[in-house]
Image (cartoon, helix red, strand yellow):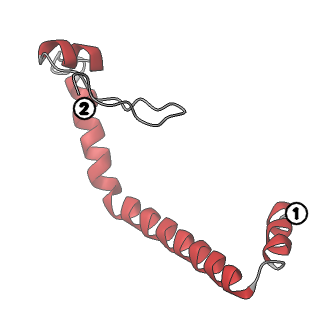
């Protein structure tokens, strides 16, 4: 066990039992999700490799183009909504 992990467990041991259980459940869920993700990637590695080859083959042939978000906004006469946050929270929409 690393020193940092041991320090985290020592701190967690000082928490009330219900908070220890909550922390343990979160840690176990995170570890399970990481395992699930790794397994999903392993199962799809051939498909991902094929997609990557297709994309790379299309570049020299002129079949692909670099994406630029500003080009999308200009071409579609729209903007991508971006939340504005400040001390008072989100701003109301224009004209509201």
Which residue is denoted by mark 1 in the rendering? 3
Apparent side of residue 51 relative to residue 76 in the rendered image (left or right): right
Q: Viewer-proximal residue, 18 or 74?
A: 18
Image coordinates of residue 33 in percent, x first then y, are: 47, 69
Apparent side of residue 34 relative to residue 90 in the rendered image (left or right): right
Apparent side of residue 48 relative to residue 42 in the rendered image (left or right): left
Q: Residue at x 18, y 12 (%)?
A: 74
To which quarter of the image does residue 59 belong? top left
Q: With respect to residue 78, does 45 lie above or below?
A: below
Q: Secondary structure at mark 2?
A: helix
Image coordinates of residue 79 in percent, x first then y, are: 23, 21
Q: Is residue 68 visible?
A: no
Q: With respect to residue 86, does 73 lie above or below?
A: above
> Which quarter of the rendered picture does the N terminus lie within?
bottom right
Q: With respect to residue 69, does 1 lie above or below?
A: below
- Pick whichever of labels 2 and 1 is earlier in the sequence: 1
Indicate which disc residue 55 carries.
Answer: 2
Indicate which disc residue 26 carries.
Answer: none
> Which quarter of the rendered picture does the C terminus lie within?
top left
Q: Residue at x 13, y 15 (%)?
A: 77
Q: From this viewpoint, which residue is outermost toward the left?
A: 76
Q: Viewer-proximal residue, 93 or 61?
A: 93
To which quarter of the image does residue 68 belong? top left
Q: Residue at x 55, y 33 (%)?
A: 87
Mark 2, other Cα within 10 Å: few <14 / some 14–19 / many ≥20: few
Q: Nearer the viewer, mark 2 or mark 1?
A: 1
């Amino acid at each position: 066990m690393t020193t940092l992990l041991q320090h985290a467990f020592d701190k967690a041991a000082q928490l009330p039992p219900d908070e220890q259980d909550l922390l343990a459940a979160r840690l176990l869920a995170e570890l399970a999700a990481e395992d699930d993700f790794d397994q999903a990637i392993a199962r799809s590695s051939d498909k991902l490799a094929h997609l990557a080859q297709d994309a790379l083959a299309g570049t020299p042939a002129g079949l692909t183009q670099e994406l630029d978000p500003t080009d999308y906004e200009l071409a579609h006469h729209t903007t991508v909504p971006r939340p504005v946050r400040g001390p008072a929270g989100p701003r109301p929409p224009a004209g509201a």
